[in-house]
Image: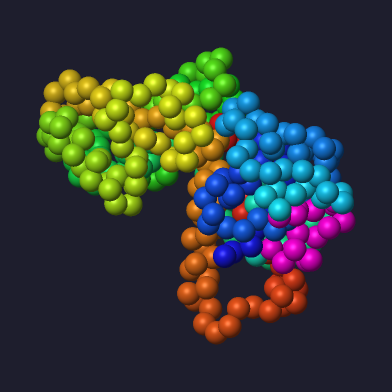
């Protein structure tokens, strides 16, 4: 299993760590944040009002944070890429990007940077609709829980096709996105439900529900977004309103974990022979993945 470290243990650092332990896809071997008191790290990880209490053991032991019997260093002098032998580091402080190599251990370079979730919540649904029916043009509106603001940056495919806006409202968590679009190919609403459900049984596993859900049902949900089949409406066969729910920060944190696991699997496939010796790994340094603050 790929060994990862977390640089920064603020809200996103904690959620990525929680997602790592929950998913079991990566092995967290080091946590680094010299700016937060160790006992406070324990408290904040174990008790988080938004995702709820961590279902595991958390304690401070010998100056280190221990989660489920795995020890993570918190001293700046501890190099994540050194003794811990981490292969990937999630950078969620943004300090390391500006002070490269300053006490954080050798870093091989920026391997990948994830988009903020506010640019990705509607992507799975929009792709399914576009692939099957074509999106001529559309508007997306998201209702945001309390967070900072960030502009959505469209990729070339969606430039001048999809535009969006957001309402920030005083709730602690769970977002909803309304995708209203004009279709190139005529489709009844049941046809749209059918293709989204089919996609949810394949690459977009469980991104679909017909249950009578409310927002809090998606608290700590690991998906990028979940299509609510019962909430959408069709004005006609070419003009539809589609609704998806998502947990902005926890969904994003799980995509960080997925990216590390996926990237590691591809690197292992491309690198025949025995695993890299520990000393060579230390000299090579870990890959750095930058995780922007969800907005």
Check residue 84 for magenta coloring: yes
Q: Residue at x 70, y 58 (%)?
A: 29
**In the image, is residue 55 above or below residue 262?**
above
**In the image, is residue 169 above or below residue 229?**
above
Q: Residue at x 57, y 31 (%)?
A: 51
Q: Nearer the viewer, residue 216 or 133?
A: 216
**In the image, is residue 276 above or below residue 110?**
below
Check residue 190 for magenta coloring: no
* 95 sits to left or right of 154: right
Residue 189 lies, in percent from the top left, at 17, 30
Residue 292 lies, in percent from the top left, at 61, 42
- Residue 43 picture quarter: top right
* 179 sits to left or right of 167: left
Q: Residue at x 54, y 54 (%)?
A: 24
Q: Nearer the viewer, residue 223 or 18?
A: 18
Q: Quadrant of the N terminus?
A: bottom right
Q: Which residues are magenta?
A: 70-86
Q: Nearer the viewer, residue 128 or 55?
A: 55
């Amino acid at each position: 299993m790929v060994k990862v470290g977390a640089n920064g243990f603020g809200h996103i650092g904690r959620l990525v760590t929680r997602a790592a332990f929950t998913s079991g896809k990566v092995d967290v071997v080091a946590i680094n944040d010299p700016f937060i008191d160790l006992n406070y790290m324990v408290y904040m990880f174990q008790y988080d009002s938004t995702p709820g209490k961590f279902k595991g053991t958390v304690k401070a032991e010998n100056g280190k944070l221990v989660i489920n019997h795995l020890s993570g260093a918190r001293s700046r002098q501890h190099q994540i890429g050194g003794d811990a032998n981490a292969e990937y580091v999630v950078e969620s402080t943004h300090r390391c990007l500006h002070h490269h190599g300053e006490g954080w251990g050798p870093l091989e370079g920026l391997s990948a940077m994830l988009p903020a979730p506010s640019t990705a919540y509607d992507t799975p649904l929009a792709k399914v609709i576009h692939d099957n029916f074509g999106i001529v043009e559309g508007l997306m509106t998201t209702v945001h829980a309390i967070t900072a603001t960030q502009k959505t940056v469209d990729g070339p495919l969606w430039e001048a096709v999809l535009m969006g806006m957001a309402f920030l409202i005083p709730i602690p968590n769970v977002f909803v996105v309304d995708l209203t679009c004009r279709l190139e190919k005529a489709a009844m609403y049941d046809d749209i439900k059918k293709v989204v459900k089919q996609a949810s049984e394949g690459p977009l596993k469980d991104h679909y529900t017909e249950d009578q859900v409310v927002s809090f049902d998606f608290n700590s949900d690991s998906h990028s977004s979940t299509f609510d089949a019962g909430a959408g409406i069709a004005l006609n066969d070419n003009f539809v309103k589609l609704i998806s729910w998502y947990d902005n920060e926890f969904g994003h944190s799980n995509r960080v974990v997925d990216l590390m696991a996926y990237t590691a699997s591809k690197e292992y496939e491309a690198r025949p022979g025995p695993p890299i010796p520990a000393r060579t790994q230390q000299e090579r340094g870990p890959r750095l993945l930058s995780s922007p603050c969800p907005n």
